[in-house]
Image (cartoon, grey):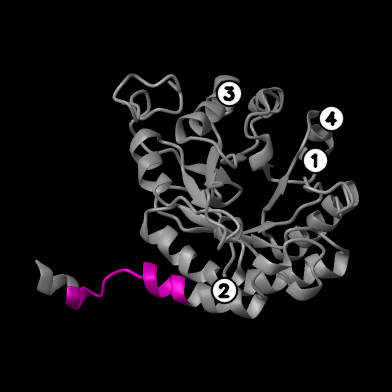
Amino acid sequence: MSIHGKTPAYKLASRERHPEPTVVRVGKQAVGGGANTVIAGPCSVENREQIIQVAQQLKQYGATMLRGGAFKPRSSPYSFQGLGEEGLKYLAQARERTGLPIVSEVMDIEHLPMACDYIDVIQIGARNMQNYPLLRAVGRLKKPVLLKRGLSATIEEWLMSAEYILSEGNPNVILCERGIRTFETATRNTLDLNAVPVVKDLSHLPIIVDPSHGVGIARYVPAMSLAALAAGADGLILEVHPDPERAMSDGQQSLTPAEFNLLMQRIEKLTAPIAPEVAARSV
């Protein structure tokens, strides 16, 4: 049933038509099905050395995929807009060094053929969640799609956007909660962790959480990462930069590699299986 108790319009995304959870395969990685996916990397690819250095560190610390923006939708036309295809080439070189699949945003249809030559997961950003021609275009591909929730989108609107992709024949959709715009100004957005159990109830699609954009302040990211996993998220997408104070975009919300390492250690403890002797006492 939908949130309002009616048969949902998002037929293909709904659990009514697909009761078993979907697992999206990205190379050897699985998103959903009990696997904790951790996608990490800088907001923007700035140069070859930066992305390869951070990719190697992320691989060492347990990341499962590498994120990095080559095309950046920025509020100001004067802000850094990304390196374009050059950035995608650097991402591909980082993948060659580490084996980490690449997640990167595509902003318009004309870039899709070129971008698909380099990346493993197409990210549709929050500002493009309702760019229906773009959604249809990625739906005609078989490549996995990471669909971020819009800044002010309801959960039903978000699932209807997923429906556009599914209806074109692409079943490989990963949802991403990244915070919504509310009256609160203490953080960049309000991370809606309600969305995790609600989406799990309504849809079979895997859902990950982006606490970096969700709160926009690096020191709050670890707590919200752990909260997201405790709420049942299938994984995280995190911004990590080797020198956040000099980052060309979103430095204030980026973890350092050392901070990412500490978070991964905490995640391992949170998600570790119950010790046999403890399990035995609870029977």
Magenta region: 266-278
The amino acid pointed to by label 3 is Tyr
Q: Kindly check if marks 2 and 1 are in contact, taking CB atoms under 8 A apart as contact.
A: no
Residue displayed at 56% across by 35% down: 172
**Mark 1 residue crowding within 10 angstroms, few (<14) / some (14–19) / many (20+):** many
Residue 121, visible in the rendered structure: yes
**Mark 4 residue crowding within 10 angstroms, few (<14) / some (14–19) / many (20+):** few
Residue 217 x/y as whole percent: 61, 67
Which element type, helix, strand or loop, lies under badge 2? helix
The residue carrying mark 3 is 164
| C-alpha gap between disc 2 and disc 1 | 33 Å
Nearest the viewer among 122 and 255 is 255
Vertical placement of residue 168 versus 78, above or below = above
| C-alpha gap between disc 2 and disc 4 | 38 Å
The residue carrying mark 2 is 219
Which element type, helix, strand or loop, lies under badge 3? helix
* Lateral position of residue 159 relative to residue 204, left or right: right
The residue carrying mark 1 is 115
Q: Earlier in the sequence, mark 2 or mark 4?
A: 4
Nearest to the eye among marks 2 and 4: give it: 2
The amino acid pointed to by label 2 is Arg
Residue displayed at 79% across by 56% down: 91
The amino acid pointed to by label 4 is Glu
| C-alpha gap between disc 2 and disc 3 | 36 Å
Vertical placement of residue 131 versus 279, above or below = above
Secondary structure of the magenta portion, mostly? helix
The residue carrying mark 4 is 110
